[in-house]
Amino acid sequence: MPKTTTLLIINGPNLNLLGTREPSTYGTATLADVEAVAADAAGRHGWAVTCVQSNHEGELVDAIHGAAGTADGIVINAGAYTHTSIAIRDALTAVGLPLVEVHITNVHRREEFRHHSYLSAVAEAVIVGAGISGYRFAVDHLIEKLAGGPSVTTSHEGR
C-alpha cells in the first residue's frame, strides 16, 4: 500500500477562539474553517492533513517531534509563540521537515513586538495578512515544493 503523504497543520495559542476573538482583527472564520481550508487544499493534491491546536507550548513541541516519520511537512501558525518561543524553533529545526509559517493578520502592521519571528528564518516561506486563505497558499506551496513541482523564481532583469 502506498504511503499517505501528510502535512501537519499546527495552530498555537488563542487560535481555538477564532470566530469570536477580536473579529475586527481576525475575522469571523473559525478554527474548524481553517482546518477545512487546509484539508481541502491538501485533498486537491491527493494529500492529507493532521491538525493540532494547543494553548500549551510543550504540547506544540511534542506535536512537532511526533511529525518526524509521520508527516512530510509542517504548516504552522504558532500565534504569540512565534515571537517568544525558541523551544518551538528548536523543535522545528530538530525534525528537519520543510515548513511554512502562516499568520492570518499582517503582523508587520501590528504592534512592534509582533514584527519579530523566531520561526521565519527556518521556514521555506512566510505568509502573512491573507486571512485563512494563507493556509491554502501555504499547503499549495509546500506540496508543490515537496512534489518537485513548479517553483517560483524572481527575475530582477529590466528593473
Image: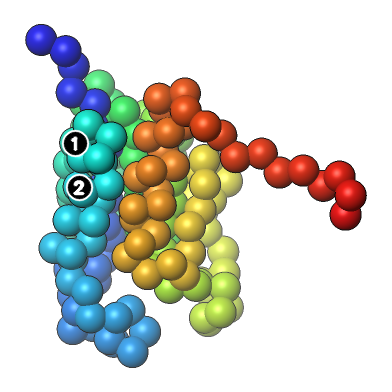
The answer, for residue 102, to whether it is visible in the render is: yes
Q: Position of residue 41 (x, y in %)?
A: 27, 47
Task: Give me the disc on residue 39.
Answer: 2
Any part of residue 83 in sight: no
Lateral position of residue 27 relative to residue 149, left or right: left
Position of residue 7 in the picture relative to residue 99 (left or right) = left
Q: Is residue 35 above or below residue 67?
A: below
Where residue 125 sits in the image (x, y, percent)?
A: 52, 47
User: Which residue lies most toward the top here?
Assistant: 1
Question: Residue at point 40% right, 52% down?
Answer: 137
* Mark 1 residue crowding within 10 angstroms, few (<14) / some (14–19) / many (20+): some
Q: Residue at x 41, y 38 (%)?
A: 142
Q: Is residue 102 above or below residue 91?
A: below
Of the 4 image quadrants, the one containing the C terminus is bottom right
User: At label 1, which amino acid type do we have?
Assistant: Ala
Height in image: 70 above or below 26? above
Residue 48: give its label.
1
**Residue drawn at (47%, 23%), measured in percent from left and top?**
148
Q: Position of residue 43 (x, y in %)?
A: 21, 40
Q: Are marks 2 and 1 in contact (CB under 8 Å)?
A: yes
